């Protein structure tokens, strides 16, 4: 990037690594320098929580507000009913209105931790595109909005081409998504003076559509800015782990597991993640990222604490670090580990499992799946066969992969390898 920005927001975007592309660097930079710019990012309500993959864009909105501008978090109450086809291999399952509303309520919990919706100047706005999409008259929409879209051009977007090149079906319902998202930008510009849409680089085509539509209908100059689609240095998609998605809501992923995700960052990613996911000064991020040997572990703890403090609060970060020290340094159980009270676990008598002691037993694989330390029974059995499944730090024997029910009347510590732990008892 050779452009030298005037505005604080563009400087942060470039220096910290948030910026992949922009429709007009100079035009946007000048608008940001002249006064308050309103910008939005849209979030479809496909789950009850956002995950770490969304965190990059949430931080962009946070920096936007910190540099004096106004962020809009646009909930996709309307567009979720259609589903974004971008770079997907199949159509999203359609959700009902009640599930969409419940998902939006879950997602809203996260934004309040990163953005200020109550400040006097340039408060963040929480909007829902169902406000203008649900009441559209189809014929009028086709006549006044649909006529501005070229099907030839829409077919040329990479998000659509990649689907068609694989000869995978793209429904007319999904094809309409691009038009609806473009209309969102038009309405936000008309109602709130919104000048900027931001999103991941996979949203570039949708953003361009919105800019083009707004210019045609309102003759207004507006802008688009995208962030890179992040992968970790070992090639994994950001926000994914062996246990599945890294959710941002505490009721879907414990603060301890969230903290551990960041603590387990590979050495090569530490500096980059400090710049993107914390507010530490740039020089400090670079210093910590350059540490080598065992010193890099201290930087990982700082990363985990900073990110967890933003998402779950300073107390949760401190408790997670204390539990990690208890578990890893002292071999203890740790009070902050995720807890599971398991019910409906099948119990088998001693003679069936050929146990030496009388009593009832349960398959260890079922317990590890119930504690979300294994995705499936097959995954749990593999873990056991590799001596990676431990109960109170003692490996489960592949020759006898059962746990006595009496040993699970109070919490025991389960471990999947050295880094993933949980507390479990039978309910």
Image: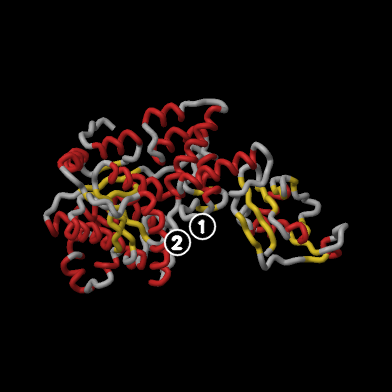
Quick one: 184 or 110, which is closer to the camera? 110
Circle 2: is it few (<14), some (14-19), or many (20+) Cα within 10 Å? many
4 versus 310 height, above or below = above
Mark 2 touches mark 1? (CB < 8 Å): yes
Which residue is denoted by mark 1 in the rendering? 252
Q: Residue placed farthest to the left in the image?
A: 219
In this view of the protein, can residue 330 be seen by the observer? yes
Quick one: 86 or 251, which is closer to the camera? 251
The quadrant in which the C terminus is found is bottom right
Residue at 78% from the left image edge and 66% from the top image edge: 348
Task: List x then y, in percent, for residue 10.
Answer: 26, 38
- Classify residue 44 by image quadrant: bottom left
Residue at 47% from the left image edge and 55% from the top image edge: 249
Which residue is denoted by mark 2 in the rendering? 48
Q: Residue placed farthest to the right in the image?
A: 356
141 versus 339 height, above or below = below
Q: Is residue 74 left or right of residue 344?
A: left
Circle 1: is it few (<14), some (14-19), or many (20+) Cα within 10 Å? few
Task: List x then y, in percent, for residue 109.
Answer: 41, 57
109 versus 16 height, above or below = below
In this view of the protein, can residue 39 be seen by the observer? no
Residue at 18% from the left image edge and 38% from the top image edge: 26
Circle nearer the N terminus (2, 1): 2
In the structure shown, which secondary structural element does the residue marked by tag 1 occupy? loop
Q: Alpha-carbon distance for marks 2 and 1?
A: 9 Å
């Amino acid at each position: 990037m050779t452009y030298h920005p005037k505005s604080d927001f563009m400087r942060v975007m470039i220096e910290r690594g948030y910026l992949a592309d922009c429709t007009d660097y100079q035009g946007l930079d000048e608008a940001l320098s002249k006064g308050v710019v309103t910008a939005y990012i849209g979030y479809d309500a496909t789950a009850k929580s956002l995950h770490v993959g969304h965190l990059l864009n949430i931080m962009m909105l946070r920096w936007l507000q910190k540099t004096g501008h106004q962020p809009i978090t646009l909930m996709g109450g309307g567009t979720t009913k259609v589903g974004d086809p971008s770079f997907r291999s199949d159509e999203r399952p359609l959700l009902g209105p009640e599930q969409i509303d419940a998902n939006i309520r879950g997602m809203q919990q996260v934004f309040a931790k990163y953005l200020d919706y109550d400040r006097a100047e340039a408060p963040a706005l929480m909007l829902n595109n169902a406000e203008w999409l649900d009441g559209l008259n189809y014929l009028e929409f086709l006549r006044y909005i649909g006529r501005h879209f070229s099907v030839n051009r829409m077919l040329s977007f990479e998000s659509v081409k990649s689907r068609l090149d694989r000869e995978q079906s793209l429904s007319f319902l999904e094809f309409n998504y691009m038009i609806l998202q473009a209309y969102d930008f038009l309405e936000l510009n008309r109602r709130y003076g919104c000048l900027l849409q931001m999103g991941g680089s996979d949203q570039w085509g949708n953003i361009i559509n919105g800019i083009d539509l707004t210019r045609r209908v309102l003759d207004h100059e507006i802008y688009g800015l995208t962030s890179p689609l992040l992968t970790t240095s070992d090639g994994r998609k950001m926000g994914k782990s062996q246990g599945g998605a890294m959710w941002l809501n505490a009721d879907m992923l414990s603060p301890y597991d969230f903290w551990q995700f960041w603590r387990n960052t590979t050495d090569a990613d530490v500096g980059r993640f400090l710049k993107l996911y914390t507010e530490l000064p740039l020089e400090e991020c670079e210093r910590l990222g350059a540490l080598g040997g065992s010193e890099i572990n201290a930087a990982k703890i700082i990363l985990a604490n900073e990110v967890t403090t933003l998402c779950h609060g300073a107390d949760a970060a401190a408790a997670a670090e204390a539990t990690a020290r208890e578990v890893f340094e002292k071999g203890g159980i740790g009070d902050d580990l995720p807890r599971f009270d398991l019910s409906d676990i099948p119990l088998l008598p001693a003679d069936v499992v050929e146990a030496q002691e009388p009593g009832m037993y349960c398959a260890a694989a079922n317990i590890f799946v119930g504690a979300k330390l294994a995705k499936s029974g097959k995954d749990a059995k593999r873990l056991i066969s590799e001596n990676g499944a431990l109960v109170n730090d003692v490996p489960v024997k592949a020759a006898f992969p059962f746990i006595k029910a009496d040993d699970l009347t109070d919490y025991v510590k389960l471990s999947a390898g050295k880094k993933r732990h949980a507390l479990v008892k039978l309910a």
